[in-house]
Image (cartoon, helix red, strand yellow):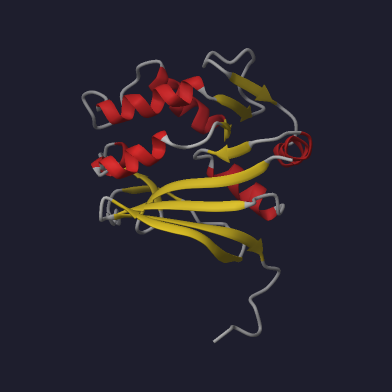
């Protein structure tokens, strides 16, 4: 059975990106980059908007506000290109042009449920905020991981991650600090029907 990871890279105030900021907010350090290179083989899950954005980067489109890709950004996009990717969309047309990408038009929740039951290895979301919300609501997420970069993008932040989420209890399973400034936290999530009546002391 496959394991499903929802994986976010955020500012401290919970934004997925910020207007005018480079990838990783320009703050990726050697420890964080080394950790990224050690990650196991994974199949990435994404929606149409994330596919359009990331496949555009792979085709050479430069992010808004930048003149060129930094080497760290190029390496990240190259790794994504080589990885297996499943894209859930009713608007995209097959065949997808980004290498190693498979288009699925079926209901994403039911498709991922089947992938978990019938597969092995790690499934991980990338971006795709509405897809992540749907998978969490359905109780399919085994691990919820956030890497928080030390910036607050209150003026320029884009894509508020947690808007529209259900209430979720989080049991911490891992944490670490990269380069003395960037914090990883990982949890086992449990969707709540209502706030807990009794909170442990």
Does residue 190 lie above or below 197 as drawn? above
Quarter of the view holding residue 165? bottom right
Quarter of the image with the C terminus is bottom right
Residue 55 vertical placement versus 5 (above, below): above
Q: Is residue 127 left or right of residue 177?
A: right
Q: For residue 176, which quarter of the picture? A: bottom left
Q: Nearer the viewer, residue 9 or 164?
A: 9
Q: Nearer the viewer, residue 40 or 46?
A: 40
- Residue 141 is left or right of residue 50, and the answer is right
The residue drawn where x is 73% and y is 39% is 116
93 shown above or below 165: above
Tell me which residue sits at (58%, 84%) in the image: 200
Q: Position of residue 39 (x, y in %)?
A: 47, 37
Q: Dividing the image into 4 quarters, which one contains the N terminus?
A: top right
Percent position of residue 172, x then y: 53, 64
Q: In the rendering, at what x and y percent does residue 164 appear?
A: 57, 57
With 32 as the anchor, is 67 left or right in this view?
A: left
The one of 111 and 35 positioned closer to us in this rendering:
35
Q: How many marks?
A: 0
Q: Residue furthest left?
A: 67
Identify the image quadrant of residue 74.
top left
Q: Which residue does the image show at 62% across and 12% down from the upper left?
A: 95
Location of residue 125 in the rendering, given as x and y in whole percent from the top left corner: 56, 40
User: Going 65% across and 22% down the picture, which residue do you hit?
Assistant: 103
């Amino acid at each position: 059975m496959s394991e499903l990871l929802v994986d976010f890279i955020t500012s401290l105030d919970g934004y997925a990106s910020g207007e005018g900021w480079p990838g990783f907010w320009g703050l990726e350090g050697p420890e964080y980059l080394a950790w990224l290179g050690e990650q196991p083989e994974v199949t990435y899950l994404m929606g149409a908007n994330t596919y359009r954005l990331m496949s555009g980067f792979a085709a050479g489109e430069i992010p808004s506000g930048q003149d060129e890709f930094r080497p760290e950004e190029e390496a990240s996009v190259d790794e994504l290109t080589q990885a297996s990717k499943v894209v859930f969309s009713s608007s995209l047309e097959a065949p997808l042009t980004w290498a190693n990408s498979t288009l699925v038009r079926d209901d994403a929740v039911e498709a991922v449920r089947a992938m978990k039951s019938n597969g092995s290895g790690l499934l991980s979301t990338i971006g795709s905020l509405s897809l992540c919300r749907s998978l969490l609501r359905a109780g399919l997420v085994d691990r919820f991981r956030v890497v928080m970069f030390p910036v607050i993008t209150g003026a320029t932040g884009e894509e508020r991650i947690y808007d529209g989420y259900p209430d979720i209890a989080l049991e911490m399973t891992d944490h670490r600090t990269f380069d003395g400034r960037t914090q990883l936290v990982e949890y086992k999530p449990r969707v709540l029907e209502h706030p807990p009546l009794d909170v442990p002391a």
